[in-house]
Amino acid sequence: MNSEFRLESNQPIAGRFLPSPGAQEYFFSDMDLAITMAAKSFTRPSSEIRVVHVPTGEVVFRKLPQQRPNLSDEP
């Protein structure tokens, strides 16, 4: 199997569809599957998840860190 796409983060990645949740990278041969897995996965709020095309190093998908809501009383 040719793994051309890497789902990666600098923190452990969690998601119920991952083969063994908790790793920092997973490899896929299909770009659409890699992007779908990235979109449905999560990590710590301060970390992003990326899908990288391994042969070129190009980031083909990026799930940015979630912004925490501002809990102040001011509008």
Image: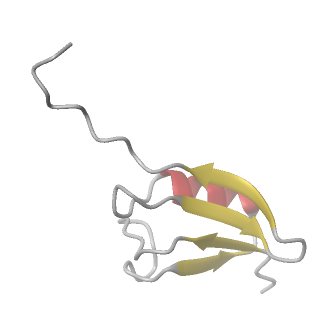
What colouring style does the render use?
Answer: secondary structure
Q: Position of residue 3 (x, y in %)?
A: 76, 81
- Total number of numbered discs in the rendering: 0
* Relative height, residue 3 to residue 5 (above, below): below
**Residue depicted at 36% across the width and 41% down the height:** 67
User: Residue 68, located in which quarter of the rendered image?
Assistant: top left
Q: Position of residue 72 (x, y in %)?
A: 13, 27
* Relative height, residue 7 to residue 1 (above, below): above
Determine the residue located farthest toward the bottom in the rendered image: 1
**Residue depicted at 80% across the width and 76% down the height:** 54
* Relative height, residue 51 to residue 75 (above, below): below
**Residue depicted at 40% across the width and 76% down the height:** 12
Determine the residue located farthest toward the front in the rendered image: 74
User: Residue 44, located in which quarter of the rendered image?
Assistant: bottom left
Q: Position of residue 37 (x, y in %)?
A: 54, 60
**Residue depicted at 45% across the width and 72% down the height:** 18
User: Residue 75, located in which quarter of the rendered image?
Assistant: top left
Determine the residue located farthest toward the right in the rendered image: 56
Residue 31 left/right relative to 75: right
Question: Quarter of the image containing the N terminus?
Answer: bottom right
* Relative height, residue 52 to residue 45 (above, below): below
Residue 75 left/right relative to 11: left
Residue 50 left/right relative to 59: left
Residue 53 left/right relative to 61: right
Q: Position of residue 29 (x, y in %)?
A: 75, 73
Determine the residue located farthest toward the top in the rendered image: 75
